[in-house]
Image (spheres, rainbow, N blue to C red):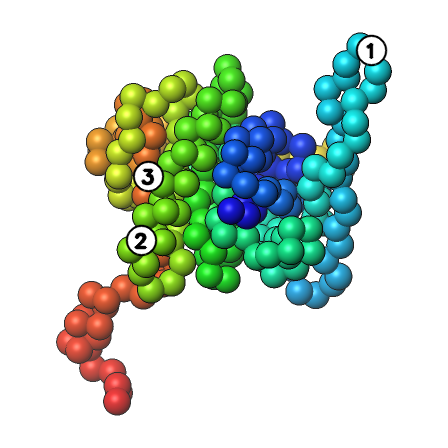
């Protein structure tokens, strides 16, 4: 199996390293990640200027005081997570491994991607872009930005993703499967299949003034406005210590809207 690993926290994120390391047990791994952090950029793509990238090399752990062997770790892309997924699926994965990726893992994100947050998430966007191109994809996020140990969380995520991939091969559906997996900060109590939370956290806009007297804003979200999430949602499941698995779709059509349109006086053919 050929696994493409992308993220939005950047090429040097510990979550990315852990996920790529764990994915190696499935086969060949290609790492393609943003050169700098790209959190919250959604499905942004590069199309008005060149999409640049460079190889990233690392050294293995030293032995007997000698420098470790230098090896190819991945590609750092000066673009978005969606750019990384596109390059990885269509070009860089094939150049490095000789085949298109079979599975894409996006993460591990430093922080959860639940509810309406999936629409802003660069991590989820990386998975969506790969699914656009026919590759089964799993976005992986952790509620903690600094868990005690990334390795067991990455191993858990890879095991779940591998089973999803095999299930998709046995029972193929129309289009590539797309999943969102959120992990607690410690070993999950279990795995729950849940819906996205419908509760949206409120926006924070804090007005400030620059030293020159120009107004500007710090933006963010207020978690206090979310309330207690329902237990059958992604936010509720991870809050209770479970891993939350949600099937996603990128067709944003609302079927119920067609019935509503019939009641409106619009010149529809």
Q: Are marks 2 and 1 in contact (CB under 8 Å)?
A: no
In three-dimensional space, the C-alpha distance between marks 3 and 2, rounded to whole angstroms, equals: 19 Å
Mark closest to the chain's N terminus, 3 or 2: 2
Residue in the foreground of this view, choosing between 3 and 141: 3
The quadrant holding residue 228 is top left
Residue in the foreground of this view, choosing between 46 and 261: 46
In the image, is 196 to the left or to the right of 42?
A: left
As drawn, 34 above or below 48 = above
Q: Position of residue 122 (x, y in %)?
A: 53, 46
Mark carried by residue 159: none
- Counting the numbered discs, the total is 3
Mark carried by residue 170: 2
Mark closest to the chain's N terminus, 2 or 1: 1
In three-dimensional space, the C-alpha distance between marks 2 and 1, rounded to whole angstroms, equals: 49 Å
At a point 34% along the width and 30% down the height, the residue shown is 243
Q: Position of residue 89 (x, y in %)?
A: 58, 56
Kindly identify which residue carries mark 3.
Answer: 245
Kindly identify which residue carries mark 1.
Answer: 65
In the image, is 202 to the left or to the right of 193?
A: right
As drawn, 172 above or below 14 = below
Mark closest to the chain's N terminus, 3 or 1: 1
Judged from the image, the secondary structure of the residue bearing numbered disc 1 is loop
Residue in the foreground of this view, choosing between 198 and 107: 107
Q: Position of residue 219 (x, y in %)?
A: 54, 38
| 3 or 1: mark nearer the eye | 1
| 3 or 2: mark nearer the eye | 2
């Amino acid at each position: 199996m050929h696994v493409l690993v992308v993220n939005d926290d950047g090429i040097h994120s510990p979550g990315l390293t852990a996920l790529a390391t764990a994915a190696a047990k499935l086969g060949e791994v290609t790492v393609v990640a943003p050169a700098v952090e790209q959190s919250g950029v959604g499905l942004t793509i590069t199309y008005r200027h060149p999409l640049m990238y460079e190889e990233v090399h690392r050294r293995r752990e030293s032995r007997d005081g000698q420098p470790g062997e230098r090896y190819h770790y991945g590609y750092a892309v000066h673009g978005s997570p969606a750019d990384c997924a596109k390059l990885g699926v269509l070009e860089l994965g094939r150049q490095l491994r000789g085949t298109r990726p079979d599975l894409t893992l996006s993460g591990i994100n430093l922080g959860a991607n639940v509810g309406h947050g999936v629409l802003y998430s660069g991590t989820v966007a990386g998975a969506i872009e790969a699914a656009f191109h026919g590759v089964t994809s799993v976005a992986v996020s952790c509620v903690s930005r600094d868990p005690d140990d990334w390795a067991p969380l990455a191993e858990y995520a890879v095991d779940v993703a591998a089973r999803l991939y095999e299930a998709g091969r046995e029972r193929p559906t129309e289009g590539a499967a797309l999943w969102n997996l959120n992990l607690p900060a410690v070993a999950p109590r279990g795995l729950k299949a849940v819906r996205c939370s419908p509760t949206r956290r409120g926006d924070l806009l804090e007005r400030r003034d620059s030293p020159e007297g120009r107004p500007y804003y710090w933006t963010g979200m207020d978690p206090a406005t979310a309330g207690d999430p329902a237990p059958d949602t992604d936010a509720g499941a991870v809050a209770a210590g479970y891993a939350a698995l949600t099937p996603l779709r990128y067709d944003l059509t609302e079927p119920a809207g067609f019935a509503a349109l019939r009641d409106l006086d619009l010149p529809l053919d």
